[in-house]
Amino acid sequence: MSSDPWGRVDETGTVYVRTADGEQVVGSWQAGSPDEALAYFERKYEGLVVEIGLLEKRVKTTDLSAKDAQTAIDHIREQVDAHHAVGDLEALRGRLDKLVETVDARREERKVQRAKQSDEARHAKEALVVEAEELAQSDQWRAAGERLRALVDTWKGLPRLDRKSDDELWHRFSHARSAFSKRRKAHFASLDAQREEARKTKEKLVAEAESLSASADWGPTAARYRELMADWKAAGRAQREHEDDLWNRFRGAQDVFFAARSSVFAERDAEQTENLKLKEELAEEAEKLVPVQDLKAARAAFRSINERWEAIGHVPRDARPKVEGRMHAVERALQESEETEWRRTNPEARARAEGLTGQLQAAVDKLQGQIESARSAGNASKADKLQKELDGRQALLDQALKGLQEFGG
């Protein structure tokens, strides 16, 4: 019979292991000595120790799943519980129990982590849905479309939620994208229709512009071209492949007309510049008639100048007021001379002037007599008052006498 602290072999070759519940049969050994039997089952125990050590290391240092770790623990525990090894089996059970606690704690940590990740993913997907629903109402077609595509890529990178939640959020997200695509499609369909309408309108404008390009009716045609340009801008843009060609035709027609008009106007401007020189010479000739010495001769000379003036064509518009103003000034001087002569030779006017002068002279003489009487009587106050009245009458008399002189009196 052979034994050690954790086991023994009896005389029949039966191997026992000592446990807290008493001795348990490990097996039967008939092939050699009892010491060899104990050594064999002790090696099996050491194998279990090594296996548990390796499992402890894997649990601590790798991402071994809790399920796989528990399967490995159960496999080792079955060997320990089968009592097929000699050694401190209770110590192995203790280590396995601690390992279970570690795995359970790891499982709980991962559960919490998964819950946190799931919650974060839920909030992230909800935020994507809200943004997608806002973008669905946007009219910034390119920017919003690019952003929605980026949101899809972001969505694909997020973890899945439980099927119900994930499907509900995806339905909202997908619906927002579809709504945006539908609105964008409708917008561009409408835009295409508008551009087609613009093309038709501009075709008509081009046709009219080309028909006017040979016109010599400068003013009305230029005004019509301005109206056509306003209509062109109001028509909006046609399709890109038509817009440039239509514009080149439209602009080309205008250029033909305005180039012809410019050529004609250049000739006209040269003619009007020459006309201005001639009229300036006539104005200078007319100005020599002032001041008027001989009204009749001056009138005849002015009529001759005016006839030659009228025979000359137009002058540049900006120079017209000045040169015409010079002629008008001479004409006004002649009119004023005529009015002066008429007043001088008009018998009725002369009689009225002489009558007024006589009345004022009588009033002045009377006031002078009254002033002398007042001063002789010592009434200085009355004399001063009468003197002021006399001053006023004397001023009127002086003015009347001056007017009478114009009649040659």
Image: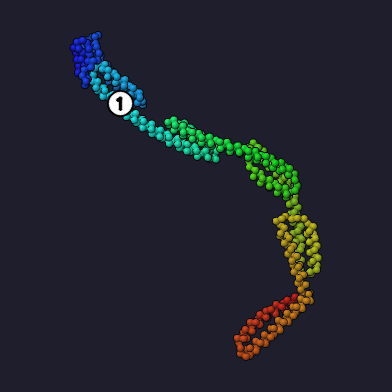
Query: Where the N terminus falls, by quadrant?
Result: top left
How is the model colour-coded? rainbow
Image side of residue 291 versus residue 154, left or right: right
Q: Where is residue 2 in the image (x, y as percent from the top left)?
A: 19, 13
- Mark 1, Cα crowd under 10 Å, few <14 / some 14-19 / many 20+, is some
* Vertical comparison of 110 with 34: above or below: below
Q: Nearer the viewer, residue 119 or 334?
A: 119
- What is the x, y in percent for residue 62? 35, 26
Farthest-out residue, front? 164
Where does the C terminus fall, quadrant-wise? bottom right
Which residue reaches farthest bottom?
377
User: Which residue is depicted at the point 76% across and 52% down?
Assistant: 271
Camera-nearest residue between 171 and 264: 171
Of residues 401 and 130, which is closer to you in this image?
Answer: 130
The picture places residue 36, in percent across and down from the top left corner, at 23, 12
Does the rendering let one see residue 266?
Answer: no
* Quarter of image, res 109: top left
Task: Give the residue drawn at x 75%, y 61%.
Answer: 283
Type of the residue with mark 1: Val
Res 163 seen here: yes
Q: What element carries label 1?
A: helix
Q: Residue 232's x, y, as percent? A: 66, 44
Residue at 63% x, 82% y: name it: 388
As drawn, 309 above or below 124? below
User: Which residue is labeled 1 in the image?
Assistant: 100
As drawn, the residue found furthest toward the left would be: 1
